[in-house]
């Protein structure tokens, strides 16, 4: 097969708010090779990611992503890895490139899986896919009472695990304590409670440490991103002061090295990988192996559609002991409508990873039209990008 | 003062080749606050960087850079640091943002310096600027003979130091040995010889190690970027096997943590910072302090215009013992024409850092017109970007 075309669909809700909710827009990727089609999704700012695909070359180490993809052979996993290396080298100085490439790489695995009638996790080298325990991933309520109700509601819907994140967490020690206690109360004594600090403490270890007692008392499993994603020493310092709680991070990793360094130097207990940022499924698979070998738990990071969710489950589908999975429950309508297939917990509250070919998710063309953002990019009168037809 | 406007000028040569030559295009930034103007330059792919400034918001942690800049107060260094933190937080998930922000940050220091009649290095906290020893930064010749002639020519122009980089280095052990010997011969026995491998060995320590003997024999001062910028363990492993040569790296750092990690975990002997990527002058100044405290030598990374060169000298202007500076000698005409002022070695072959206000470099408006790339970006019929008038 030969990559004939890569189409980038920029979709958005009519209203995009400043909430830390990644499901308000999407950059969906369609890769076409002959009569084969694959779909992927970048977890990225759509316009800069489109620009990274179509921009004129700046020099040999700053080429657009398209130059390493269009016209290339795609007959097996080795071809995807070859293109991945080509993008990393040819687009070395194009910072946005890994975000653009991630959705393309994902779509290539989908295409390959469909062409071979195999699920992606099998192409990635796993014999079997194990069920995952989903945690409902939501934002904190504006008040502790709201968080309590949100947690009860989640439990009421059959989830045994929930993650609460972002503001107002970090606003004050007492307010945070109240929020944590409310989340614990709502999820119940036997529920799994996870917290996402949304980098609010930047690299201030002492500020984060003021929350340790409340975190331990609420029996949080982990505290995610208390700091800037690259503040390794802050993570390590906080981690050393925690007893039962562990640190978590990794969503911003845009290559496998960054994730490995979070394990090696920041000493996180949970590594969270977004396949829409790290370069797709293969580097995520490499990180999963790296984590497993070091006693660190791998978890997907997903706050967008079920296409991205399916992709995010593939890299650790075969790791039986890495059971938790992030499962967004408050997606905006765009992310719901984007796929015809939806991943829902079974009667036991578990996520069964599909063995349908590719990513096993059918994209809804009507949604590509309904939420389409009409983009036009011209340089010197030449049209470099025009939104494609679904 | 209040930031009224940020103009982004995308310039390019009529022909852009695949050579690893960053002077073939440019993204020049003009910041306007009342009647004050400052200039900066991003070392970045222009179109994605423009997109990162004007794109619609994706969510609260993925906002365009413009949202953290336009209308903000700029009365002193603390305002620049505040905006820097705002961009890092508000554009957390917009990977290209640091490259866009770098040129803006640089232009803000220039503006502030001009408004106060002070050179940027003084605003950064230095009392005095020390001279630097420039190394001519060029690409290897296609043959060893070409490299020999290039090295002789450099020496003939009064440079005592030269760096040779990129392909064909890495092609073969014997060919590399010949190239290194030719470079040493050309620069003379007392010349300072530096080598840039252009990441050719990716993370293959053994492949790089095959060049150790030739590097030590040619008395190279450092081997720059033998590996992917994030392959810390490969750097550390190679470094441990070197005797007289040291490793160098850091140009890709897009925040100060990345540079600090190269020092702490990759154990480079030289840290090379590009102010057009790391977020401008202030994070570079922080890295300079960090390096100096740990016995690591700070060097600028510059392969573009003299505007970028002046900016890159400011963060370590006051560090007397960090003497070397990268000095591109084979700039394409666009980068030469871009500035009216040019930084040239004095009679002793040294670079004297100007004490003119700001960056001390006058931008040539005619060049902004001559090399202008006419960019138009529209989303849903609304024009988000149109190339500004010089």
Image (tube, coloured by chain):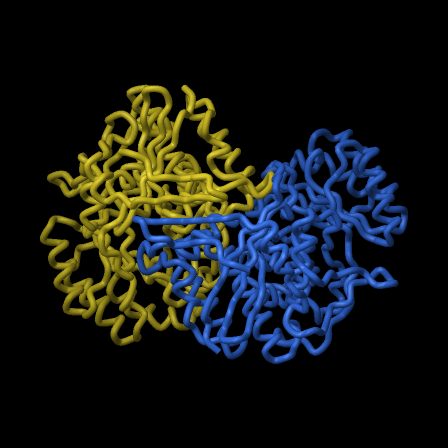
Chain colours: A blue, B yellow
x and y, in percent, of residue B94 in the image: 52, 46
Residue at image coords 40%, 56%: A54
Quadrant in which residue B54 is drawn? top left
Q: Is residue B324 in view from this perspective? A: no
What is the number of callouts on the image? 0
x and y, in percent, of residue B39 in the image: 31, 33
Question: Horizontally, is A189 left or right of A180 in the view?
Answer: right
Residue at image coords 33%, 43%: B27
| Quadrant the N terminus of chain B occupies | top left
Q: Is residue B183 above or below residue B162?
A: below
Residue at image coords 35%, 28%: B126
Quadrant in which residue B278 is drawn? top left
Quadrant in which residue B37 is drawn? top left
Decide which of B33, A315 is in the foreground and name it. Answer: B33
| Quadrant the C terminus of chain B occupies | top left
Question: Horizontally, is A211 left or right of B47 in the view?
Answer: right
Residue at image coords 68%, 54%: A337
Question: Horizontally, is A151 left or right of B303 in the view?
Answer: right
Decide which of B351, B384 is in the foreground and name it. Answer: B384
Q: Is residue A81 above or below residue B277?
A: below
x and y, in percent, of residue B26 in the image: 30, 45
Q: Is residue B117 above or below residue B140?
A: above
Q: Is residue B185 in view from this perspective? A: yes
């Amino acid at each position: 097969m030969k990559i004939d075309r890569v189409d980038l669909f920029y979709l958005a809700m009519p209203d995009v708010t400043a909430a830390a909710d990644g499901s308000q827009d999407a950059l969906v990727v369609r890769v076409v090779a002959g009569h084969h089609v694959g779909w992927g999704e970048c977890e990225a700012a759509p316009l800069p990611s489109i620009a990274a695909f179509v921009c004129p070359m700046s020099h040999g180490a700053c080429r657009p992503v398209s130059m390493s993809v269009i016209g290339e052979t795609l007959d097996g996993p080795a071809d995807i890895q070859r293109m991945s290396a080509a993008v990393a080298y040819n687009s070395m100085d194009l910072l946005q490139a890994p975000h653009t490439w991630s959705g393309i790489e994902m779509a290539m695995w989908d295409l390959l899986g469909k062409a071979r009638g195999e699920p992606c996790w099998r192409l990635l080298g796993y014999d079997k896919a194990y069920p995952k325990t989903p945690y409902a991933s939501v934002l904190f309520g504006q008040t502790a009472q709201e968080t309590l109700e949100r947690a009860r509601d989640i439990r009421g819907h059959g989830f045994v695990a929930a993650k609460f994140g972002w503001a107002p967490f970090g606003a004050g020690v007492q307010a945070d304590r109240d929020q944590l206690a409310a989340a614990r109360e709502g999820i119940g004594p036997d529920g799994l409670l996870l917290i996402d600090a949304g980098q609010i403490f930047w690299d201030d270890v002492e500020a984060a440490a003021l929350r340790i007692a409340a975190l331990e008392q609420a029996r949080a499993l982990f505290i995610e991103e208390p700091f800037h994603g690259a503040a390794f020493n802050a993570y390590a310092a906080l981690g050393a002061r925690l007893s039962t709680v562990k640190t978590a991070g990794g969503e911003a990793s845009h290559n496998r090295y960054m994730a490995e360094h979070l394990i090696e130097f920041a000493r996180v207990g949970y590594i969270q990988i977004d396949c829409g940022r790290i370069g797709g499924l293969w580097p995520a698979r490499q990180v999963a192996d790296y984590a497993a070998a070091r006693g660190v738990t791998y978890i997907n990071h997903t706050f967008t559609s079920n296409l991205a969710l399916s992709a995010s489950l593939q890299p650790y589908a075969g790791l039986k002991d890495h059971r938790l999975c992030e499962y967004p429950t408050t997606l905006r309508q765009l992310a719901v409508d984007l796929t015809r297939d939806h991943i829902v917990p079974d009667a036991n509250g578990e996520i069964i990873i599909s063995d349908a070919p590719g990513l096993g998710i059918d994209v809804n063309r009507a949604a590509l039209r309904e939420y389409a953002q009409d983009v036009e990019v011209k340089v010197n009168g030449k049209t470099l990008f025009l939104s494609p037809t679904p």
